[in-house]
Amino acid sequence: MQSKGAIKFVAILVALACVYQLSFTWATSHQEKKAEKYAEAAVEAVKQSAQFAKVADVDKAFYLDSVAKEKNRFYIDSISSEKVFLGYTYKDIKAKEINLGLDLKGGMNVMLQVQVKDLIKALADGNQSPEFEQALALASQKEANSREDFITLFAESWDEVAPGKRLASVFGTYEMRDKINPETSNADVIKVIREEAESAIANSFNVLRNRIDRFGVTQPNIQKLGNSGRILVELPGVKEPERVRKLLQGTASLEFWPTYDNSEIYPFLVEANAALKDILATEETEAVADSTAKDATSELLANDSLSADAAAWAKENPLFAVLNPSVYNNQLAPGACIGRAHYKDTVLINSYLKMPQVQALLPAELKAMWTVQPSQFDPSGVLYELVAIKANTRDGKAPLDGGMVSDASVAYGNTGGSPQVDMVMNAEGSRIWARLTADNLQKQIAIVLDGMVYSYPTVQSEITGGRSQITGNFTITEAEDLANVLKSGKLPAPATIIQEQVVGPSLGSESINAGFISFILAFCLVLVYMIIFYNGAGIVANIALLCNALFLFGALASFGAVLTLPGIAGLVLTMGMAVDANVIIYERVKEELRAGKQLRTAIKDGYSNAYSAIIDGNLTTIITGIVLFIFGSGPVQGFATTLVVGIITSMLSSIFITRLIFEARLDKNKNITFDNKFSRGFLQNVHIDFVKLRKTAYIVSSALVIISIASIAFKGFSYGVDFTGGRTYILRFDKDVTAEEIRSAANAEFGETVEVKQFGGESQMKVTTKYKIQDNSTEVDQEVEAKLYNALKGFYNAEMSLEDFTSTVNNPNGIISSDKVGPTIADDIKRNAVVAIVLSMIAIFLYIAARFRNWTWGTGGLISLAHDSIIVIGFFSLFSGILPFSLDVDQTFIAAVLTIIGYSINDSVVIFDRIREYNVLYPKRELKLNINEALNSTLARCVNTSASTLVVMVAIAIFGGEVIRGFACALIVGIIVGAYSSIFVGTPIVYDLNMRKAKKAELKK
């Protein structure tokens, strides 16, 4: 083996890099366990306190839970900016750990759609011309079956509805006069519309991002999905789905407010600080603390980390202990900022300032609002500024709102330098803005969005004409964000939830346990399987498998991948597929040994002859994994990621790690065994005339395909909510129930058919309804949950409130998981599923045809894949409702079909590769003989590769949990059918096509 030293060096480096990456996951877990112990100690201390004795018995459990959670959060917050591991802060190592998906840790996954159609209407200022309305309607129709964005479809529709007519006649409004004039071309108008829409979507994204920061969720994820106007939000561990829905879908409110000066407010803060000292020292305060225990804002929780002296000072100065007054050179700093505070103290400060006794001391017109970004004077990035807003209008509303801003953009001053933001008001806004700036010369005006201060620039002079420049030490990104904020009030761009998934922590915990058990069991089964069949070489393969697991997890950690339940299935699947390469190599080595070669030579030739089959087979699976990643979403992408990364790491470890171990043993003159008594003669010296059996196989396959197609056509499928749209709830009862009685009660309440299936044990049911699915409002979400509660509350032994029934956190029963998919997203998922399957097949056909330099090989592989896919899909149709677990057709099922496509071709490639080899070795022999010998010689290899993967999929099906059982079932059927079709369908078709091709060539002669 050449370059052994270099390969060893690289392998060691990669292993060390993987250990380094995984160490962050360990370090994070270690710190979080310390936080849990800290919280447990605090809970024990609270139990002994006099304050706890005064809490009502019914509230004690909740109170202790609140204390534990707040203490845990307090500890984590306290170390978030401290170096805790290898010079990294907790915040840093948390970002580097392997993340768990929502299906494993619980939480909420939301897809929001910014309504681009409404944006276009707003840009046209309510234009109601027939052509405009028709173009919008036509674009909406096209959108249902197109991958183009709405603006492109609108442009196409306009050209169809009003050919030759200028769009400037529609969009040349007063507010758009600086960008669109009567001579502006349609292409330029569309460019302006696209820029405005992208700006609105960017602003919606920023608004959502800042709203999400208020949930206190660890590692939230928010991302824009291309140019579709869709925004994906993932909130792990979120506890109040209803609050999330309301906040995410709320309309952004942009306001301009005058402000107080720091010197005007500071004396009132001094009075408030003194009053708080007295308030917090009284029995009344203890009562208030008890009443707000559920919010965990008591003094006990606020001052825990202070030293004795600091605690005494904080007791004397409760407000200034958490709010640092705005001071510069021992004097009050000028401006509207009245103090700075650590982000973890902002809630406590808000609660202080909202106390009636404190509010009575403060100016009636004072509104204290926090900045959305940390203070520029705080390099640590944890201190936020509190700005004194002056609400001095008669109705208490802002004197100027965002609806009067006609445009905002980033520009540079005449001398260059830092970017600035140019803002343009409409006519009414210009008048108000002139008055507001005249009244506040040399004072600051706060720009507020959603109750958060984005900027509070100083007014240098009265601004007339409606044009203003906002300057400051902006970065380009900050200036762009502020410009987008200023434009937020211009266009009605509400974001509506079109897809939603809520997973309770109990279901997530069950998924983790099931996934972990199935992974460990499958891993052990593969280890045992390899030792049974390949003896000493099997042990070497197992060492490579362990290395592969290290490489795989290390790679996932370095990529920042999210581990989902389908992702765990992908890990388990790659464990099975990892040994495929070893099986191919070992069977080739055994052939070389039977040919009389020495062990070292047999190993060398075995590896050399196996490379092409290994590379081709794995590349075809990688192709389907990439397609799956592109067209899938959420957990399906997690599966695709682990599958692709796992295939790459398993291929490298199987080829290089095993070879290094073999070379090391050979150098020490140690023997290596590749079989034992049990497996030595397994499928050797087999002489089956497969080509002769092809017509019988065609009949069997045709029958299976016809039965599958008939079932698909006449019986159809049980579709998951992904494909149909609707709302699905997984419900847990405190006793066994039947699907029939739950269905009957739900149908009566909803007044329409509700689908009910058993999900796992007899105390869990999966309920799906399409009730008012066209309406994405939170009101309908609440209505559906209320109807479900009214229908099913009688099936619980213990009395349950609506709040407990709908909570995925506070109650182990009731709704433990929910999904909502709007009809638009359901159509997209169906379309993407079809496109993904077709593209995978085309890509594999092209690869095989190119690799074997003949279209007949690609056609044989393609027909074999179509055969496998149809039978697996037909199986799901035929046995749906018969087998005791869900066989819904959803995104996970499509992932299974694509995996089958990639895996099935693997066997075909191994066989095709051997046929090609025999054709080169024996070019004058009949093709039939070469094919039969190739099939017989690779039979043991095909059976072993399929069996090793089948073993792990059976483990997933049995122990992986209800959520993943249908997925595992699809793969089991696919592996069996794929092994059959590679031998009895794909290869015979290659034979028939080549024979027909040869006959045509003869006739031409």
Image (spheres, grey):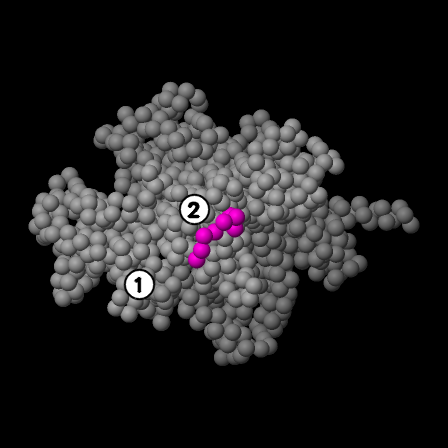
Residue 117: which quarter of the image? top right
Residue 210 spot, x, y in % from top left: 40, 50
Residue at the image point whose x is 74% and y is 37% from the top: 164
Residue at the image point whose x is 44% and y is 27% from the top: 771
- The residue where tag 1 is placed is 333
Q: Secondary structure at mark 2?
A: helix
Given residues 252 and 776, the one toward you in this image is 252
Q: Which dot, 2 or 1, sits closer to the camera?
A: 2
Label 2 to label 1: alpha-carbon separation: 27 Å
**Main SS category, magenta section:** loop
Q: Is residue 829 above or below residue 7?
A: above
Amino acid type, callout 1: Ala
Residue 729 visible in this rendered orientation of the protein: yes
Tag on residue 435? 2
Given residues 986 and 19, the one toward you in this image is 19
Q: Decide which of tag 2 and tag 1 comes sooner along the chain.
A: 1
The answer to whether residue 787 is left or right of residue 597 is left
How many residues crowd around disc 1 within 10 Å: few (fewer than 14), some, or many (20 or more)? some
Q: Quarter of the image containing the N terminus?
A: bottom right
- Is 16 contained in the magenta span? no
The part of the chain drawn in magenta is: 460-467
Residue at the image point whose x is 21% and y is 56% from the top: 267
- Is 466 contained in the magenta span? yes
Residue 980: which quarter of the image? top right
Residue 583 visible in this rendered orientation of the protein: no
Q: Is residue 117 above or below residue 15?
A: above
